[in-house]
Image (spheres, rainbow, N blue to C red):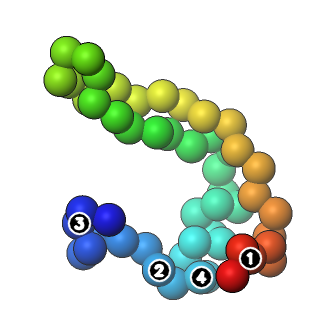
């Protein structure tokens, strides 16, 4: 992550954020150089870890 001071690493905070919303937002730069935000649906299965 580019801005380490904004990174969320606490598992309880991550759980709270993911369980409180149903739409994520993916931000990228468009071809014209301006930011572009795309809403995305996602599924979060509590307690599932890829470690």
Read off the residue under disc 4. 11
Residue 6 is left or right of residue 40, and the answer is left
Query: Toward which corner of the image does residue 12 lie, by quadrant?
Result: bottom right
Q: CA distance from mark 1 to mark 2?
A: 14 Å
Read off the residue under disc 2. 9
Callout 2: SS: loop
Extreme residue toward the top, this view: 32
Mark 1 closeness class: few <14, some 14–19, many ≥20 residues within 10 Å: few
Residue 32 is left or right of residue 30, and the answer is left
48 lies above or below 38: below
Q: CA distance from mark 2 to mark 4?
A: 6 Å
Read off the residue under disc 3. 3
Position of the N terminus, as image quadrant, is bottom left
Read off the residue under disc 1. 49
Front in this rendered view, residue 39 or 16: 39
Q: CA distance from mark 2 to mark 3?
A: 13 Å
Q: Position of residue 19 (x, y in %)?
A: 70, 61
**Closer to the eye: label 3 or 4:** 3
């Amino acid at each position: 992550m580019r801005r380490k001071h904004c990174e969320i690493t606490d598992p309880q905070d991550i759980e709270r954020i993911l369980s409180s919303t149903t739409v994520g937002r993916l931000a990228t730069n468009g071809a014209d150089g301006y930011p572009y935000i795309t809403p995305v649906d996602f599924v979060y299965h509590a307690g599932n870890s890829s470690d």
